[in-house]
Image: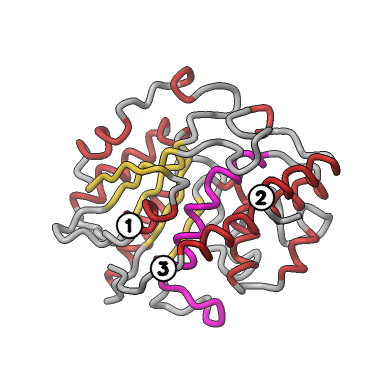
Amino acid sequence: MQTTTPDFTALTRTAAEIRGTVIDMCHRAGTAHLASCLSCIDLLTAIYWHAARVDPSRHKAPERDRVILSKGHAAMALFATLAKRGFFDPSVLDTYCLDGSALAEHPSLDCVPGVEASTGSLGHGLSFGLGTVLGERIQGRDIRAYVVMSDGECNEGSSWEAALYAPAQKVSGLVALVDYNKWQATGRSEEVTSLRPLAAKWAAFGWRTLEIDGHDMKAIVGALDQVPDGDGRPTAIIAHTVKGKGVSFMEDDNNWHYRAPTADEVVRARQELGLA
């Protein structure tokens, strides 16, 4: 449980700057998944600048917490966050998706410092995080694993296998943050496979479950500060988010799952984010 008092203004500003960086990256590379990145950036910001015990200068320290972006299609958000946090030089972001670059559309383990897992095959991140915490427990280390998931991967059986096993093993260091933006690649989440009531499902599996506004920095920090659970339960944070958050003409528009912004749209987006 954290004891430091966060600077919410600074956290919000950091999230806006990361959004601007991601929009620039998407424009240069002409790649997909921009809106999926924008919905989870507030979560990543709160994790890396407040909750996770990490040191960019010692990114392989055995006692570090692990942050796993299970929704690997939002790799731009992870890369931009890691660069902003000091894990590697931000100039590397300019190579995103270029031939020979370490930065691809999905993250690969150790492609740059701070990437803890190869992800993007949805539904595997939670199991990976669970196994990591259990493995470190065997080594006598008490770490936490923060797993940022999509709502779509809550359709996957492997997610629920991990959800069953973690409470049984009292893995209180495991935190699932569900980026519940209500969209999947081709339609509304509820139209593909109904998830409601999502929070109740996690609670029924034995998790301490918190339901928050995933763009309210105080709510995110408040939820993260409740880890670990005093009863030995893992924590599921159901974060209600908006796909494309921060840019009015992208918000809740699933066309931005695949579209890249034009130069003019980049300017408009950065103005809305207060970065112009």
SS at circle 3: loop
Name the mark on residue 222. 1
Residue 274 versus residue 255: which sits nearer the camera?
Answer: 274
SS at circle 1: helix
Q: Look at mark 2 in the image and give the residue it sits on.
A: 273
Residue 256 position, x and y percent, is: 68, 33
Query: Decide: marks 2, 1 in contact (CB < 8 A)?
Result: no
Residue 164 position, x and y percent, is: 25, 42
Colour setting = secondary structure
- Disc with the residue nearer the chain's start (2 vs 3): 3
Report the predominant secondary structure element of the magenta stretch.
Answer: helix
Nearer to us of marks 2 and 1 is 2
Label 1 CA crowd tier, 10 Å (few <14, some 14–19, many 20+): some
Say which quadrant the C terminus sits in.
Answer: bottom right
Question: Left or right of 166: which side holds 221?
Answer: right
Say which quadrant the N terminus sits in.
Answer: bottom left
Q: What range of the chain is rendered magenta? A: 33-58
Disc 1 from disc 3: Cα separation: 10 Å
Residue in the image at 47% along x and 46% along y: 215
Residue in the image at 38% along x and 61% along y: 145
Name the mark on residue 62. none
Residue 112 versus residue 217: which sits nearer the camera?
Answer: 217
Q: Look at mark 3 in the image and give the residue it sits on.
A: 6
Residue 1 versus residue 14: which sits nearer the camera?
Answer: 14
Query: Decide: marks 2, 3 in contact (CB < 8 A)?
Result: no
